[in-house]
Image (tube, rainbow, N blue to C red):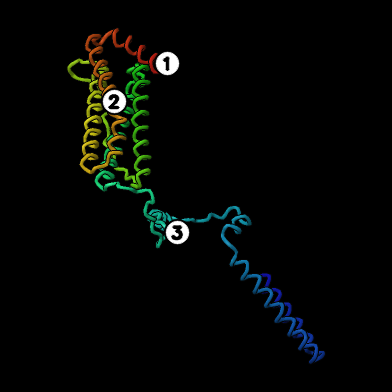
Amino acid sequence: MMRSVLIVAVSFCVLRDASAFSPAASMVLGANLRATANIACSRQIRSAMRPALRMAGEQPKQVIDFGKVGFAEADNQMRSLVFQPEGGEIEPESRCRVNWDIKLEQALNDHINVEYTASYAYHALFSYFDRDTVGLAGHAKFFAGQSVEERGHAEEFMRYQNIRGGKVVLKPLAVPDMQFSRVDGTSDALYAFELALMLEKFIYKKLLDLHALGADCEDPQFCDEIENYLGEQVRAIKDMASYVAQVKRLGTGHGVWDLDKTLGDRVEAV
């Protein structure tokens, strides 16, 4: 700013002295003065309008306050961001839906939730026995395999739902307990296998309900599909019941450790 003032002052002096010699020279110098003043002002304005970040490089000691930028307001706007599909698009009806009763569609979705819930519970058992304070790696491997098996069943039923032209609707899962010890001194291994036996019986009951509903809806193909799982389920119930009996015979001592080694070897053999 001081530089522009000096330029203007010098120019006035030159103009005053030149006007004494020639009117024409006075007009030329006046035009030059106005141009010089305009350039000085424009430079000053551009300097004032430079971005703050650019000026920070020229003036390292200057502190820039970002509190006025409005990041908090932008953050609140992002929190309200919700994905929505484009409007006007309607999902077409399934072309493979044949004699698929809506009651069977809903019941199958409920059973998918049952299979996922069982998988969730078995995964919780895996996590418990894998702890360093429990140290039963064979039990952990066994229940991890059971979790994968039940999740596989859920996926198979989801594929079947799509084959029949239905729509899979997933639902919330019940959160399983993560502590499997008892105050009466019974081993956690017995607790876990009793829980597993209850789960397998519950799944079997739900499969029978699906089969009965399929018969009521006169859908023999659906009944045939459910029958593929009934034999596997009764064998799973027998296995879990046998494990419960074995743990009761072994007690809480060395026998549980020996069963743990046996479970681990069986899982690896499969």
Task: Give x and y (percent) for residue 10.
Answer: 73, 77
Q: Measured along the vertical axis of the image, is residue 234 above or below residue 87?
A: above
Within 10 Å of disc 1 (Cα), the crowding (few <14, some 14-19, many 20+) is: few
Work out whether 192 lies above or below 151. Answer: above
Q: Quadrant of residue 267?
A: top left
The reply to whether dot 3 and dot 1 touch (C-beta < 8 Å) is no
In terms of secondary structure, where does tag 1 sit? helix
Which of 104 and 215 lies nearest the eye of the viewer? 215
Callout 2 amino acid: Gly
Q: Name the residue under label 1.
A: 269
Outermost residue toward the top?
Answer: 254
Is residue 96 shown left or right of residue 251? right
Label 3 sits on what residue type? Gly
Q: Which residue is drawn at 25% across and 33% down?
A: 207
| Residue furthest to the right | 21
Q: Can residue 96 be seen in this view?
A: yes
Task: Give the CA separation, mark 2 to mark 3.
Answer: 65 Å
Mark 2 or 3: in front is 2
The residue under label 2 is 231
Residue 204: x and y in percent read 24, 29
Image quarter (top left, top right, bottom left or bottom right) of the C terminus: top left
| Residue highlighted by disc 3 | 70
Q: Residue furthest left?
A: 184
Percent across and percent down for residue 197 are 24, 23
Query: Which badge, 2 or 1, is on the more N-terminal residue?
Result: 2
Q: Is residue 1 visible?
A: no
Q: In this view, does 170 lie above or below 60?
A: above
Q: What residue type is labelled 1?
A: Ala
Query: In percent of the image, x 36 and y 12: which residue is there?
Result: 261
